[in-house]
Amino acid sequence: MTNAKPIRRIAIIGTGVIGASWTSLFLAKGLQVVATDIAPNAEAALRKFVETAWPALKRLGLSAGASQSNLKFTADLTQAVAGVDLVQENGPERTVRVKKEMPGHVANRLQAALAREVYYLVAEGVVSAADVDTALCWGPGLRWGVMGNMMLNHLGGGPGGIEHFFQQFTGPMTAWWKTLGSPVLTSQVQKKLIDSVHAEVGSRTIEELEAERDEMLLGLLEIRTKGAKTAAEPKTTTRVA
């Protein structure tokens, strides 16, 4: 016997990008959502986000009863949480466990560290924006879409794992670190970066680029979902007589 109550109605507190994403996911799962946010035009922005995300959610597979009409909005927090089965709060991210105080989110700090070297290489004329983007997305970015840096280092060490990785690559890595740049984003440097990006973009619009990005992300999500299901399946062995 269990006291677990089925979750059918959810309150979403905060409808920024993260809250709107949760809202879209819950609606796609056939649940009822009551959202609340005190920001101006929050309801209109949320409904537009859900509408835009809906085709991708349909492609991934909607649950029975899934409908955008299951979304209700109120600016009153008390009304939003009344009678719901679950409250989803979307304030400051809690993406991983942060064990000590540090400015900024972990993911943003990692992105900033990489962006610093990207800007440096383009500003110094080492590569164009197009070439640095190619090197990034077809190099580490391709692998980072599957596993994180530390796990990939473990695999990079071969049978010896992370221990052998550090034995083999500590010298080269620390030598590279000494040549990493610290660009100053002056107006001149910004213009050089901007011009290089526009050369990469060409005639493509923001909407076209967003569609290209989203299509790639959907494919990656489909592959990762399939991989996760495969990894979770019990392993069986066949005996040969």
Image (tube, helix red, strand yellow):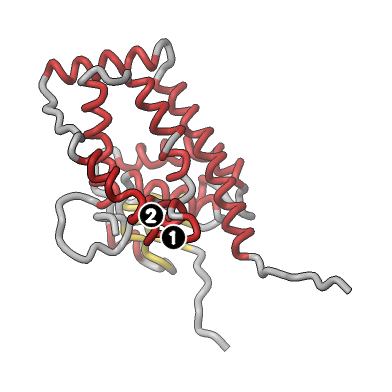
Cα distance in 3D space between marks 2 and 1 = 6 Å
| Count of labels in the image | 2
Which residue type does callout 1 highlight?
Answer: Gly
Which residue type does callout 2 highlight?
Answer: Phe
Residue 46 picture location, percent across and down: 38, 42
Crowd rating for badge 1 (residues with CA inside 10 Å; few <14, some 14–19, many 20+)? some
> Which of the image's four quarters has the C terminus?
bottom right
Residue 89 picture location, percent across and down: 32, 59
Question: Which residue is drawn at the image coordinates 50% and 79% (left, top)?
Answer: 4
Residue found at the far bottom of this picture:
1
Quadrant for residue 126, please give it. top left
Residue found at the far right of this picture:
241
Task: Give the left or right position of residue 158, taking residue 229 as reference.
Answer: left
The residue nearer to you, when weighing 240 against 148, is 240
> Dot 2 lies on which element?
helix
Question: Which residue is drawn at the image coordinates 55% and 50% (left, top)?
Answer: 224
> Dot 1 lies on which element?
helix
Quadrant for residue 57, please give it. top right
Check if mark 2's residue and mark 1's residue have beta carbons within 8 Å: yes
The residue nearer to you, when weighing 209 against 132, is 132
Residue pointed to by mark 1: 161
On residue 165, the disc is 2
Q: As displayed, is residue 76 above or below residue 134?
A: below
Question: Which residue is drawn at the image coordinates 30% and 42% (left, top)?
Answer: 42
Residue 185 picture location, percent across and down: 13, 26
Q: As displayed, is residue 105 above or below residue 195?
A: below
Crowd rating for badge 2 (residues with CA inside 10 Å; few <14, some 14–19, many 20+)? some
Residue 55 picture location, percent across and down: 56, 37
Q: As displayed, is residue 210 above or below residue 15?
A: above
